[in-house]
Image: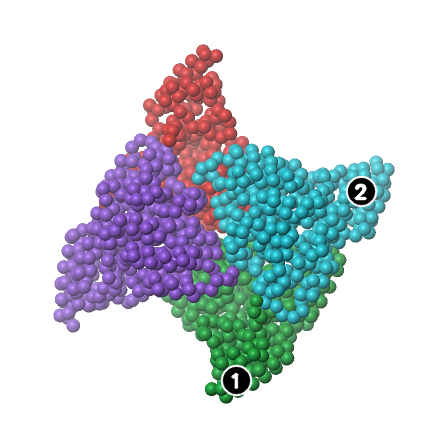
Chain colours: A red, B purple, C green, D cyan
Amino acid sequence: MTYYAFASDNAAGASGPVLAALVEANAGEAAAYGEDALSQQLDAAFSAYFRRTVRVFVAPTGTAANALALAALVPPYGDILCHGQAHVLTTECGAPEFLAGGARLTPLPGGADRIAPAVLAAALAARPANRHRRPARALTLTQATEAGTLYTPEELAEIAGIARTHGLRLHMDGARFGNALAALGCAPAALSWQAGIDILSLGTTKNGTLNAEAVVVFDPALAEDVAYRHKQAGMLTSKMRFVAAQLLAYLRDDHWLANAAHANAAAARLARALGATPGCRLLHPVQTNQVFAEIASTVQARLERHGIRLRRWGAGADTFRLVCSFATTAAQLDGFAAALQQEAGAAAGAD
Amino acid sequence: MTYYAFASDNAAGASGPVLAALVEANAGEAAAYGEDALSQQLDAAFSAYFRRTVRVFVAPTGTAANALALAALVPPYGDILCHGQAHVLTTECGAPEFLAGGARLTPLPGGADRIAPAVLAAALAARPANRHRRPARALTLTQATEAGTLYTPEELAEIAGIARTHGLRLHMDGARFGNALAALGCAPAALSWQAGIDILSLGTTKNGTLNAEAVVVFDPALAEDVAYRHKQAGMLTSKMRFVAAQLLAYLRDDHWLANAAHANAAAARLARALGATPGCRLLHPVQTNQVFAEIASTVQARLERHGIRLRRWGAGADTFRLVCSFATTAAQLDGFAAALQQEAGAAAGAD
Amino acid sequence: MTYYAFASDNAAGASGPVLAALVEANAGEAAAYGEDALSQQLDAAFSAYFRRTVRVFVAPTGTAANALALAALVPPYGDILCHGQAHVLTTECGAPEFLAGGARLTPLPGGADRIAPAVLAAALAARPANRHRRPARALTLTQATEAGTLYTPEELAEIAGIARTHGLRLHMDGARFGNALAALGCAPAALSWQAGIDILSLGTTKNGTLNAEAVVVFDPALAEDVAYRHKQAGMLTSKMRFVAAQLLAYLRDDHWLANAAHANAAAARLARALGATPGCRLLHPVQTNQVFAEIASTVQARLERHGIRLRRWGAGADTFRLVCSFATTAAQLDGFAAALQQEAGAAAGAD
Amino acid sequence: MTYYAFASDNAAGASGPVLAALVEANAGEAAAYGEDALSQQLDAAFSAYFRRTVRVFVAPTGTAANALALAALVPPYGDILCHGQAHVLTTECGAPEFLAGGARLTPLPGGADRIAPAVLAAALAARPANRHRRPARALTLTQATEAGTLYTPEELAEIAGIARTHGLRLHMDGARFGNALAALGCAPAALSWQAGIDILSLGTTKNGTLNAEAVVVFDPALAEDVAYRHKQAGMLTSKMRFVAAQLLAYLRDDHWLANAAHANAAAARLARALGATPGCRLLHPVQTNQVFAEIASTVQARLERHGIRLRRWGAGADTFRLVCSFATTAAQLDGFAAALQQEAGAAAGAD
């Protein structure tokens, strides 16, 4: 178990208000399976958040949330279009295909892990329509993307329009939805249902909660089906109040936004430090809380003398991922920047 | 949302040591997806508990745990034998059938929600064996049963022997496994692998944790398969340390046993109170923490004057379930007993 | 491989016109996968037969037809109500559960393998509606039933009305649909869509074709979904013209009706012979082409001297099934009746 | 319904001996569901064909055969590696993913629709092994390939060795297995189990039968599982003797080989004609009964004057597929060659 610096936004625990809410919820007894007072507030709280009546279902993991949502959107013979680097495709062991009973994920290309509208349009136009071929039935977008980049509301609307024209439903993997909102300065509605999303996997775990994900259903016609699928997939927790308490604390007083903005700002500092260092190169625009960088092997080796090991990522020999969270400290950032500056200079001098 | 007295062992939150362990785990950073120091202790801790090398997988709900286990034990064409009142059959919205891709649960009859060895043997002997019929491939037993009753280790071994003879794998739904152990005074091994169980759903939520169930795999040949199914079903939590911390605290210093013994003793007190009350009748032997009773309508009505509403259960017009937990207080028990005594006398006088 | 007298209506091959049509279709080349001229006539031919626009999909077996239909009618969490002796439940190795991705078949009781309207109504009324329980989503009826009995159009309409009230879709397993029509003197419409059926598995194999079953979709909103499921389940045959040729010959000139009436009449003769024989007892009214009878062991033994072995059926020690088909000959019937008369008398004399 | 010349080897019906066997099987009665005398010969006949004890299951389509085989080889979380042009991936509407309950097909690149050993080895070596990623569990190869090309026994053995090293099971889609054998002059064993294949989809429909495919199981440990999956997927035909009769006639007296050799020779003649024509270019080596060619638009237009329309295939604007079968006549070949020669000359003169 090597420990990496800036390894993941899953590395932190719960933020203070979230943990306090969980502990507070422990007092006394409450009804199980969502019949308690806290869980009963979820729909209303998220409806206020999204300025639209929504139905919310808790999920223990982002994988569970994504698979549940996609299973509700496509039949077993349906194709789900996604980016080739989408988490649902690469890192969920086939959960969407499983929960959807045989659905298929079909990857699309695109720089910075984004799907361009023209790429989607061309892919859909090129699909033959006959019973031998699977019909495309859904599109899933990750926001922020796996590369930490973003779709603007306008881009989302354009993509959604193309998808709708071809009869596709829309899912958003919002594992870092808060980071996207913070970066774009958008209202939650603008990046979700106003942009055409049918179901959103709203991740909160990476932004300050403990394994508390929310599946947000915008299309009321889907809600009953999702409710049964949710139970049948084993996601209806008995002591749901402890999940609900976290989610409510997450939404309260824009706590989610403070956390996300902190993480994004921290990543921006990492990016500036790396961008100013000879031998280092940013691989994608740093728009949210993830930094992808190429770091010369000489620099890496010197960083390790400072106890800083980074996590390799992707196909490149010297490419790394650094992720910040609500819990990333100024000391961590300063330490990294100082080590980088010192060693980059030394590496340059050693050449 | 009516609140019921003794409604469920899901009504309590976390016990003190469990919540403390969760809060303690919140300090600092840790690797995700089970690569952290706490999660890495799980296999060893449960292996010590069971005195055998086991593999453990965390699950957010008992439904998820059961379905995962059964999916690993039967093919899509396999039949799973269970009691007609088994939770997997009645209350999980078909999760086992879904995760097992089309498996079927076939109910067996039996008093006190127990399957008698002779009933199992007869059912298996009567099944035709040809390709038109689903072959029986697994047996699932609930311990303690849905009626709060028990299988002794000897009964389990006899049942398991019959099942093995017919090629069945064995699963135990141990949502109240701790209560069963406390009641029988058995070692965990004696009620599980020594009795022939292949996979155990070890519930801890009802006995003091927050949505922390464990799937314990005794047959090492099954472990890899379960690991992948676990991830594919969306159960591999990112911040797993918070589940692990609870489970470790649960096992430590026989905390589970103290909790379970407390709950069982509380139920015994309820049973004594009800048994001594005219117009009340226990429906099953009270062996663990659940009490099923028929209560005359005159008595019920008078109890409500004390603010005591009970939860109807089962097909009978006047049948109720009362469940105790680690958190049931002497005041609750005393209050109930006093109200019962007072009102039963009054009801008798009113006749 | 013991050969039984009157073993099954699957024992005969193709009737003359059907085989001739198949052989005729072999001339020349034709497009594959249903694009040929014969296959392209199927929808129109069945639409004329049913006096309504329908979509038809060929299936290699009744099991495949039933499973495809039910998979299109229920989600994975849906319950399918059926009679406890329904073929889909007892003899299809779980095909409906599999193709429907985890659906469940829930048996209802009823004499003569029929579901009474009141039984259905009571069963539906008794089902709790919450997320822990599977919702009932479809009802499947077998016509003629597994006991060879019938539902009248009026009974079907009453049952369908109850089912609709509870939001259920309706499927009919018409493995012996022709026999039912012949017996009731009904138009095909009267026993299907006019009575509320959404999808019919129209069996023709037992009535004169070679493995040519038809899935008839009455609700046009379901047709596209069935079309994709049909292909995904591997049922879209390449040389479909050979299936289509048989089905078209089956419908032409009421050939199906002649075959079915012949089989029914033959069964009626068997029933009369058995009914007149001491030691024999009919178990169900003989309304179509199946006869279920109890035959005293002394009579059975004597029949075997004539080379007549019968096929045991059901739970009784001395209960048998005898089935007639379009190919049952007068000689077979006469021989059986004569042997029965002779030996029953002898058995009586031997007593 | 445009009719194309050389459109498919599915365009012909049954060959003479096959149809005669089917008609002959129609005499008299026989047990259903494979208990008849003809069906009971299948295992022995195919065991003799493969010089090894095998179990055989009939399937109505190649799609059904492939999906059944793959479902028996991989769990729902397993990956199936295949060529990017494999029929299972492109043209079966996701049947393998569906029958395998959520499996995934992962495409590999390769010229002439062949997977090179080095490509397979590199792909397997590059796969990360952790619970987030689907493990590769099977490889499926098409023989002859979708491009009409071949794997030699030595190539198959090399590929199988690599696959085995990584724990993969092997499936072969032998929709045109007879054509491959005829072209390579191999024994059936050499291209199947001796080369490491676990299950073979042995297609006979394209080579002279009517919708009669065989799933050949070489690994006896898989047979029982396949038997149940076969029934559960609806493939156990009632009047199986009519499928068996065809398959037995197909094997008898090397009828399959005569048919395949005829088709291959016919394709070779097409290839020679096209290869000698200016403006035409073969896209793949013509090794079996399929010809893929680029044909200049001027030539195409002139061919249409002779009533010869060809079937476009693939991504190219002027690329076509021509397929020969056992039924392709000398007149068809001569007519095409003559038209081609005449019009190519005219087209050249017109330039």
Q: Nearer the viewer, residue C43 or C105?
A: C105
Task: Tell which residue pokes out farthest to the bottom in this image.
Answer: C349
Answer whether residue D4 is visible to the viewer in this image. Answer: no
Task: Tell which residue pokes out farthest to the top in this image.
Answer: A349
Answer whether residue B123 is visible to the viewer in this image. Answer: yes
- Residue type beneath disc 2: Ala
The chain that hosts pointer 1 is C
Quarter holding the C terminus of chain B is: bottom left
Q: In the displayed structure, would residue A64 be above or below residue C224?
A: above
Q: Residue at x 39, y 47 (%)?
A: B219
Left/right placement of residue A295 relative to residue B299 reads right
Left/right placement of residue A4 relative to residue A141 reads left
Task: Where is residue B265? Give x, y as percent.
Answer: 19, 54
Give the secondary structure at mark 2.
helix
Q: Residue at x 51, y 57 (%)?
A: D228
Q: Residue at x 30, y 58 (%)?
A: B155
Give the secondary structure at mark 1.
helix
- Residue carrying label 2: D273
- Residue type beneath disc 1: Ala
Q: Badge 1: how crowded within 10 Å, few (<14), some, or many (20+)?
A: many
Q: Are marks 1 and 2 on the same chain?
A: no
Left/right placement of residue C251 relative to residue A89 reads right
Task: Where is residue D146? Give x, y as percent.
Answer: 66, 44
Task: Where is residue B285? Give x, y as percent.
Answer: 24, 62
Count of marks placed on residues: 2
Q: Badge 2: how crowded within 10 Å, few (<14), some, or many (20+)?
A: some
Q: Which mark is residue C307?
A: none
- Residue carrying label 1: C344
The chain that hosts pointer 2 is D
Q: In the displayed structure, would residue C19 be above or below residue A180?
A: below
Q: Residue at x 54, y 31 (%)?
A: A111
Q: CA distance from mark 1 to mark 2?
A: 77 Å
